Amino acid sequence: MAGTASTVRSWLLLEDPGPWGRDALLHARLPERVGLELRRQCAAAGVRPLLIRRTSSNPSDGHGLTCFALRSGPEPPWIERTRLPNVTEALDLDLSALGRGERPGFESVEGPLFLVCTHGRRDVCCAERGRPLAQALAAAFPEPTWESSHVGGDRFAGNVVAFPHGLYLGRVRPHEAARVARAYADGWVPLEHLRGRSCYPMPVQAAELALRTQERLVGLDDVELERTETHAGVSTSTFATPTGRVTVSVAVEESPASFLTCHSPVAEPAPAYRTIAIERRPDLDREAP
C-alpha cells in the first residue's frame, strides 16, 4: 500500500445524506448544476471536494449542513468547521484562498476527524467493507466519524482518512477501528495500515513509510520532510528525525498487472516504489543552524 494516498493539501467536506451516484458531486441530489460548478471551482483552486454523511446509527442533528475546510500540510495542519443553510452556499466560499492554505475563519476544530469511504456506487468494495468499518468507528468515536465519497484506492478498502494530517489508512477491518483511531488520536501512526500522507507526492509517501518502518518512528511528528528530488527514475527525500537527518532513495517502478477496482474490466499495472537506500546524513546535521 506504500505511496498510494491521493496527493491533496486542501480539502472541502460538505454534508449530504445521499444517495451518491458514481460521480458523487454530479450524481447526488444536489440543486441543478451546483455539483458541476463546485467541482469546477475546486479544481481551479486546487481543493479536493468530498461529500460526507453520518452513519445510519449516528445521524446528523439536522441544523443546517456541516462543512469542513481543512489543510493537511505540509505546514502545520488544521481543521475548521461551519454550518451552511444549504449546499448552494458553498459556491460563495473563497476556495482560492483555501487552496493556498489560508484559513476561512470558521470554528477551529482540534481533531481528530475520520472519514471512511463508503461510496458503493463508485466501487462495491467500499460499501461492503466501508459500511461495517464506519459503523464500528462511529461506535467508538461518534462525533469525529463520517462516511465519505470516493477517496481513492478502492482495492485497499476499508479506507480511512485521518485528519488533520491527511493520513490514508487502508485495509482497516471493523474490529481494528477503535484501536487504529485511538492510536492516531493519541499522536501515533498506525504503520501497518499507512498508505501515505496526502500532502506529499507518492514517492515521498513511500520513502516516509520505509523510514518509519525501519526505525520504528511511530510518532506523528517523528518524521518531517525537508527536501526531495527525482532523477532517472529514483526519488530521493531527506527527512528530519529525532536522531538526525536521513535520506531515503526509492526507485519508481510498476507493479505487476492487477485489477485495481472491483469492477475493473482488465488487469493494469500501478506505480510501485522499491527502497534502494536509507542513509543517515551527519554532514547535513552539521549544516543545520
Image: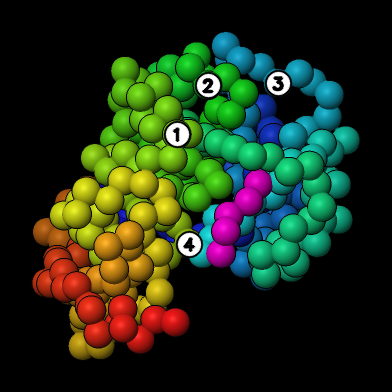
Mark pair 2, 4: CA separation: 25 Å
Say what secondary structure mark 1 lies in: loop
Q: Amino acid at mark 3?
A: Ser
Mark pair 1, 3: CA separation: 26 Å
Q: Earlier in the sequence, mark 4 or mark 3?
A: 3
Q: Earlier in the sequence, mark 1 or mark 2?
A: 2
- Callouts 1 and 2 close, C-beta under 8 Å: no
Q: Amino acid at mark 4?
A: Cys
Residue 228 position, x and y percent, is 35, 78
Q: Earlier in the sequence, mark 2 or mark 4?
A: 2
Q: Earlier in the sequence, mark 2 or mark 3?
A: 3
Q: Which residue is mark 4?
A: 199
The span picked out in magenta is 75-79
Q: Which mark is drawn over residue 141?
A: 2
Say what secondary structure mark 2 lies in: loop
Q: Earlier in the sequence, mark 1 or mark 3?
A: 3
Mark pair 1, 2: CA separation: 13 Å
- Judge by depth and name the residue closer to the eye, 114 or 30: 114
Q: Which residue is mark 3?
A: 60
Mark pair 4, 1: CA separation: 21 Å
